[in-house]
Amino acid sequence: GHANTTGPEILQDFANRRLDYWVSGYGTGGTVTGVAKALKAARPEIKVIVAEPAAAPLVMSGLPQGRLPNNAPVGPHPAWTGAHPIQGWTPMFIPYNLQHTLDNNFAAEVLPVTGEEANKAARDLACKEGIFTGISGGASFSVALDVAKKAPDGS
């Protein structure tokens, strides 16, 4: 999975260069968990930031996800209030894949992003940079910009 592909690709792209933060939202949790596992193994100091829709703050709520013996969710997460605008992100439960990231403290922080912020960032990427992405890409970029603004100089 992503621990053997995406994570090593990122590390290769940043060979001999600083990589202080990595930001991603989650759907199934596979990308976040696989990439975080690879990045943290190679560079323990990296800060993995998980982005989550402000309208669906499941992880940010601090409430645990109930699970069946096979680790499937027992039902919707207690903080689930209904659909949110960031397609492909945050189902109505915390995926078991993502639970691994949370349980192993791979995530330094979980930060919210609104649908409005995600849409604006996606439009800005298209208009200013020629990068066409959907709302989830805009959401990740929006949170990454916020992280970069608050990061220490030189990060």
Image (cartoon, rainbow, N blue to C red):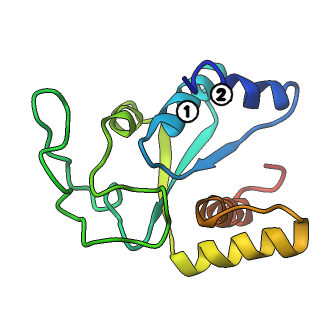
Q: Kindly check if marks 2 and 1 are in contact, taking CB atoms under 8 A apart as contact.
A: yes
Quarter assignment of residue 119? bottom right
**What residue is drawn where x is 89% and y is 73%?**
128
Q: Residues within 10 Å of mark 2 (few under 14, many from 20)?
A: many
Number of numbered discs visible in the structure rendering: 2
Q: In the rendering, at what x and y percent does residue 58 appear?
A: 31, 59
Secondary structure of residue under mark 1: helix
Quarter assignment of residue 9? top right
Instruction: Please state which amino acid type lies under the numbered disc 2.
Output: Gly
Q: In the rendering, at what x and y percent does residue 155 appear?
A: 78, 49
Q: Residue 17 carries which label?
A: none
**What residue is drawn where x is 81% and y is 56%?**
153
**Mark before the other along the chain sequence, 2 or 1:** 2
Q: In the rendering, at what x and y percent does residue 136 appear?
A: 58, 61
Secondary structure of residue under mark 2: helix
Tell me: 57 left or right of 53.
left
Disc 2 and disc 1: Cα gap in Å?
A: 7 Å
Q: Could you tell me which quadrant the N terminus lies in?
A: top right
Quarter assignment of residue 68? top left
Q: In this view, does 19 lie above or below 64?
A: above
Tell me: 32 left or right of 17.
left
Q: Between residues 89 and 117, which one lies in front from this camera angle?
A: 89
Tell me the residue that label 2 is attached to: 7
Q: How crowded is mark 1: few (under 14 residues within 10 Å), some or many (20 or more)?
A: many
Tell me: 81 left or right of 154.
left
Mark 2 against mark 1, which lies toward the viewer? 2
Instruction: Please state which amino acid type lies under the numbered disc 1.
Output: Ala
Q: Which mark is residue 36?
A: 1
